[in-house]
Structures are given as C-alpha cells and as structure tokens.
Amino acid sequence: MGFLGAKGASTPNLDRLAGESLIFEHAYAQSPDTLVSHATILSGSYPQATGATEIGGLLTASLPCLPVLLKAQGYRTAAFVGSIQLDPHDGPAQGFDRGFQTYDAGFRRGDVARASRPQIVRPADQVVSRAMAWLARNSQGPFFLWVHLSDPHTSAGYGAAVTAADGGVGKLVAALKQEKVYANTAVVITADHGQSLGAHGEETHGIFLYDETIHVPLLLKLPEAQPASKRIATKVRLVDVAPTLLEIAAAPIPSQMQGQSLLRIAKTSGADQPVYSRSDLPQRGFGWSALESWRAGKYLYIRAPKPELYDLAADPGAMRNLAQTSKATADTLAAQLENFSRRISGEHGTSPGAQLSSSEMQKLASLGYVGLQKSTGPSSAAIGTDPKDKIAIADKVLEATASLDRGNADRAIAALSPLLPAEPGIYLAEYTLGVSFAQKGQHAEAVKHLHKAIELQPDSAWAHYCMGASLLKTGDYKTAAVHLEIAAGRLPGFEAAREALGEAKAKAGK
C-alpha cells in the first residue's frame, strides 16, 4: 500500500482515498484465517465467540451481526464476495448470509462424486461489476454493501494482485460518485489478514501471528462534507469495525459486541490498547498447539509451547526471541494475555452448533471410529507440538490443498502420500487426500483417508459429507446415511448434502 509507505506500490486509488480518510496505521486482525477473521469483522466479536473455524462451523445464530442490525434500521443489505471461502451455500461460510438481502457468491466446489472442475475464486473486476449493478438499483436510501476482493491471496504475482484490487476500489468509488452518494457514504477499507510470503518460513497464511499476516491496512472515510485525512498511530483491531459502522449509522451497539468504536479512538490520542489474536488452524488442521498473541506497547508476545517475545521497536521483523532473556516482561505479558483470553471466552463461551451430540458420537463409535472426543472449543493452553518446528510441513499440506482447490487432485496426492507415514495425525492432509481420491473415482481409497480425518476431527461437516458421498459410490448406503445426516445438519446452505442424504436413504430402502 503506497499510503502506508510501501516502496514501488501501485495503489493510486487507495492512496487517493487515504487522502480523505482516517488512516489507522497500526490495525490488527484477530485471526490469520479468512473465515474466522471475516466473522470477527461482521460481528464485532472475538474468534472464541463466533463459532467460525477454518475447517467449517456455523456462525453462531445468537451473535450480533452487522447486516442484521443495519437491516433492522431500514438499510438495504448486500454482499459480493470473491472466494468460495465466503460462500454460505457451497463453501464453509455457513450462516454468513444472515441479514443480507442479496448475497452474491455462487461458487462451485469440485464434486466428490464426479470430477467436475471447481470454480473457487472470482477476480476483482467481476466482483465489482456485480456490486456496481446492485448499487445502481439500490443507492436511493440507506444501504450496507460489503465487497470482498480476494485477488491478493497467493504468493505468485502478489504486487500485481494488490494493484488489481486497487483498481476494483477505484471503480467502486467512481460508482458511488456517479450515483451522487459518495459524499454521505462511509467507506471502510481493510483486509482480513496478510500474507507471510516466506517470512518465518511460512509461505502463505493461517499458522503464524507475526505482523506479516496480522498487521492490516485500515481506512475509514467518514460521511462528511469536508473530507480530511488524519493518521492515527494508536493500535486498533478488526473487532472494532462493526461497532464503528453502527455508531456512524446512529444505530444501537449491542452490549455483546466486544470491540469499540474507532471514532472514539480517533478523537483521543490516548495510550495504546493491547491487541489479542489467535490461530486455531495449527490445532484443528494439524493436531499441533494453537497460538495466541498479545501486542502491548512495543512488545509482541506469542503464547506457544516455546514462548516468544519480541521488541518490535528494535526488531520489527520479529527475528530475536527475548522470552528467555527478558523473562519478567514475558511473564507479565503472558499473564495479561491469559486474563484477557479467559475473560472473553467466559463472556460468550464457544458455539455448540458444530459439536457432535452424544447420539452421533455413539453412532460413529459403532461404525468403528475409535478415540473420538467431543470438541471442547478453543484451548488457551499452549501444549503439544510447536508450529514453529513444523512450518515446512504446514507449507506442503497447504500447497497440496491449494492444488486440489485448483482442480489438480493428482498433484495433491503426489505431495501428500509420501508425507503421511512420517507425519501421521494431520487432519488436513487426510481430508485432502480423501477428497483427491474421491475426485479421481477411487472411492475405496478415499474412504480410508476420510475415516482417519473424521477420527481426528469428528465435528468436520465437510469430512462427513465427502465420506457419505464416497460411501454412496461403494454401495454402503446405510453407513453413508449416518455421515450425510451429520453433514446436512451442519451445512444448512449446502444442497448437495441433502440431495446425497436423500439418495442414500432411498437406496437403503427408507
């Protein structure tokens, strides 16, 4: 981003918008994952409260949600998203369409029964064109429009992808001006997370909590007649976005929202507030320890089996771990993080929606699943394998899942098959292999890997769906129905799960 000082950046539209916006120079995501971070942005609540996880999960129905609240105030609400990750029907974003009168997604995952080519992303110009068409019909009166551009989501051609997203922003601003509503429209620009691009050994995002993936741009153009640019150095968080928009709309801010309005922060130049973030993908996807971070003053503390402490003023790249040499500081920040994590977890608890019932657990046990444990929600204990020691493995698995998403099952199989004997117990590897073999029509082999995936993460609705679809192909209709009932109950927007369940019951004589 040019307005944040990046040399050689080509972001003229964002830079122009920054010239009339509040620029929050130190804004931080609460998660390095697409789904979890967007749940926080839309709800004003921390990851522990939303029920969203990167391997699936239903957005908690009782959670305050920005489109629901604004719709109740008479706003027309619409979402236009650029990735299947945010598709509430064919993707993992179940429940995200609550409150939106229009939710434009319509992506297509690879069919596990028929090796159909997936359609998982849409470039910025297409997303914006659809949003502009909606805007032309709905700009007379208050509206809430969420536009998600996913172009800068891969390491290859990252700068060009950022420029493409910048072009999309320029078209949207031009459309607002053409409709003569730009002056009295609030515009927020931010990102759900960043990309590591190889820093600390992480090729993409989702594992680590360093600045490369957690520090995000945040602009706020207020609906005022005399726009003015102001830079704000105070730390802020994405959990603050929803209450900010509600205050701008003069709408009540629910007491359950855990963020606070950026307008109040901008008016006072007070001391920094600490910033909390967490990453559950290491635990959910790989069976390693979850990570939590605490940014306070000049320090970044990361709770992990091997704790980390960095003085970002002297070491902005977080290369020198001071946890052992500055033990008193590390202990103080660790205690602050622990108290905060306990408090926000206690305020909402965890979403029960994704967890299996005792009856479902018993059915799975009768099918030969061993060692199943009900999910207890996000853990605050840094126990088990430290993701720092396994980041090269995570990179390989995530690259394989990306290959599958692009429709290349053979490449995913070639990458993961030799890895598993030395690295057992990785849910994401077993699941990706299972889906890859299913797409190649090798359903007996798929069932083996999906069985292991379900043992590792029994509340993964997608693993149950893929298992049920593969069992349909092998003729085990009764067992297929058990898995498909679990999937259909947790994927209310995913029609293919209900269709497959109907087929399984019909063929089982029910």
Image (cartoon, rainbow, N blue to C red):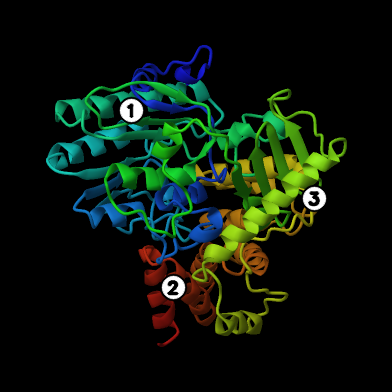
Left or right of 225 on screen, residue 253: right
Q: Residues within 10 Å of mark 3 (few under 14, many from 20)?
A: some
Which comes before the other along the chain, label 1 or label 3? Answer: 1
Going by the picture, which residue comes out furthest to the top? 8
Q: Amino acid at mark 2?
A: Gly
Depth-wise, is mark 2 or mark 3 nearer the camera?
A: 3
Callout 3 amino acid: Pro
Mark 1 and mark 2 lie on one chain; the one further toward the N terminus is: 1
The residue beneath circle 3 is 305
For label 2, the residue is 489
Mark positioned earlier in the residue sequence (2 or 3) = 3
Which residue corresponds to the image point at 79% horizontal and 52% vertical from the top-left? 385
**Is there a contact, CB below 8 Å, between mark 1 and mark 2?**
no
Would you place residue 454 above or below residue 327 in this image?
A: below
User: Are there few (<14), some (14-19), or many (20+) residues within 10 Å of tag 2?
Assistant: some
- Residue 258: x and y in percent read 48, 53
- The amino acid marked with disc number 1 is Gly
Label 1, secondary structure: give it. helix
Q: Is residue 478 above or below residue 78?
A: below
In this orientation, which residue lies closer to the viewer: 12 or 493?
Answer: 12
Q: Judging from the image, what secondary structure is the residue with disc 3 in?
A: loop
- The percent coordinates of residue 18 (x first, y second) are 38, 22
Q: What's the residue at 37%, 38% (across, down)?
A: 122
Which residue is under mark 1? 168
Q: How many marks?
A: 3
